[in-house]
Image (tube, rainbow, N blue to C red):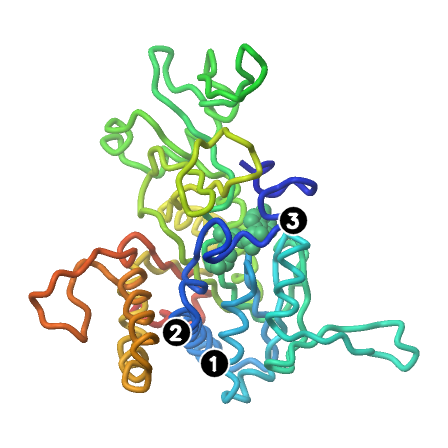
Amino acid sequence: MEEVLTNPHSGFYINQDVFGAGGDFITSPEVSQMFGEVISLMIGVWTMCLWEQMGQPEEVNLIELGPGRGTLMADLLRGSSKFVNFKKTLHIHMVECSPTLQKLQYSALKCVDEAVNEDGSTKRTISMLSGSPVSWHSTLEQVPLGTPTIIIAHEFYDALPIHQFQKSSRGWCEKMVDVSEDSLNFRFVLSPMPTPATLLYLRKRCQWASAEEVAKLDHIEVCPKAMELTHQIAKRISSDGGGALIIDYGKNGIISDSLQAIQKHKFVNILDNPGSADLSAYVDFASIRHSAKEVSEHISVHGPITQSQFLGYLGINFRVEALLQNSTEEQAESLKTGYWQLVGDGEAPFWEGPNEQTPIGMGNRYLAMAIVNKKQGVPVPFE
Ligand SMILES: C[S@@+](CC[C@H](N)C(=O)[O-])C[C@H]1O[C@@H](n2cnc3c(N)ncnc32)[C@H](O)[C@@H]1O
């Protein structure tokens, strides 16, 4: 999964823009220009509230993990441009493995390179949207420590590689990828005996679950990279103060069998043409909570709550209502579609009567979780 997505030569994310209607899939900041802006604005509201709770530090590392086209960060900076005291504290750090996407992010943030010294030998990059310095890194570890930090991980964890384990007559074994007998294709096989990963990761994940939860399952997915990343986030927040917001689709418990491949907006076979389709897996939020807590006593974990609750508590309805009042018919339609897709939880939206048929959107499938330094108290809207 890691090779398919991030191989430096032919990984899915590395050489192409995979987002939007012309790409392979759409994430919420990209759902439509107007609605994408609303989502980013809500995440901006969360970020500014946390900054207030942090005591308005004069310098903040605002880190986004896997920023895609840079749409969320650009909209967040535009949306917070009037909050001068907040804006002037920011140093933006984009953690992105794809050089192609780094370039798109540079343009989305309207970046310019300016000389730091007279001979121009040292340069820094500034976003003209906020006047903030911007840096790129391929991993979170590369972001300097020592400054209060706010981290946003929006649809990032779902791209981290998982292991799949399956119950068999030989006990729990690992599902692995093999070459087919004609050597032309890949195929899934089950390990003949428990692999080292089975012994290490399955045991680790199951220690955080009840015997009844595990007994019900024939398949279990474990994401050690998610555990590692969460350790890093929790340690950073513990030492530097601040918090992280994680939004993704997933579950507050063990994930059974969710690995999927999407190409041009359609599900395709996971093993066909590696590197041509997006691979993703549901995020195990319970494992994130336990991983964060096991490395530090100075952090607290909040949620997950549904995306629908997260956006609702932050006041998305007020924003959408204001936009609907001033929008053309076409814009209103696109806003309503976006709202249904991302906030919809089967209940009628606020602009309709209670009995109308409402499609169920992703409002319940997407979850939001926050990891914060305990000094910051409980972050909005997790109270
Ligand atoms: C599913 S996209 C999400 C994009 C964006 N956050 C959004 O919601 O629209 C995943 C992003 O993470 C980046 N990415 C995936 N795996 C990564 C890794 N191991 N290290 C750094 N970036 C990675 C991809 O290039 C892409 O920008």
Amino acid found under the numbered disc labelled 1? Gly
Left or right side of 138 for 263: left
Q: Which residue is identified by label 1?
A: 79
With respect to residue 366, does 279 lie above or below?
above
Marks 3/1: CA–CA distance = 30 Å
Q: Which residue is identified by label 2?
A: 38
Marks 2/3: CA–CA distance = 29 Å
Disc 2, disc 3: CB below 8 Å? no
Q: Residue 7 appears in which quarter of the rendering?
A: top right
261 or 44, which is in the foreground?
261
Residue, far left: 355
Left or right side of 103 for 84: left
Crowding at mark 3 (Cα within 10 Å: few <14, some 14-19, many 20+): some
- The spot of residue 224 in percent (x, y) is 50, 38
Residue plotted at (26% across, 63% down) = 340
Residue plotted at (47% across, 24% down) = 199
- The spot of residue 95 in percent (x, y) is 61, 58
**Earlier residue among tags 1 and 2:** 2
**Earlier residue among tags 3 and 1:** 3
Image quadrant occupied by the C terminus: bottom left
Note whether ligand 1 is within 8 Å of mark 3. Answer: no
- The spot of residue 194 in percent (x, y) is 46, 17
Note whether ligand 1 is within 8 Å of mark 1. Answer: no
Q: Which residue is identified by label 3?
A: 15
Badge 1 element = helix
Amino acid found under the numbered disc labelled 3? Asn
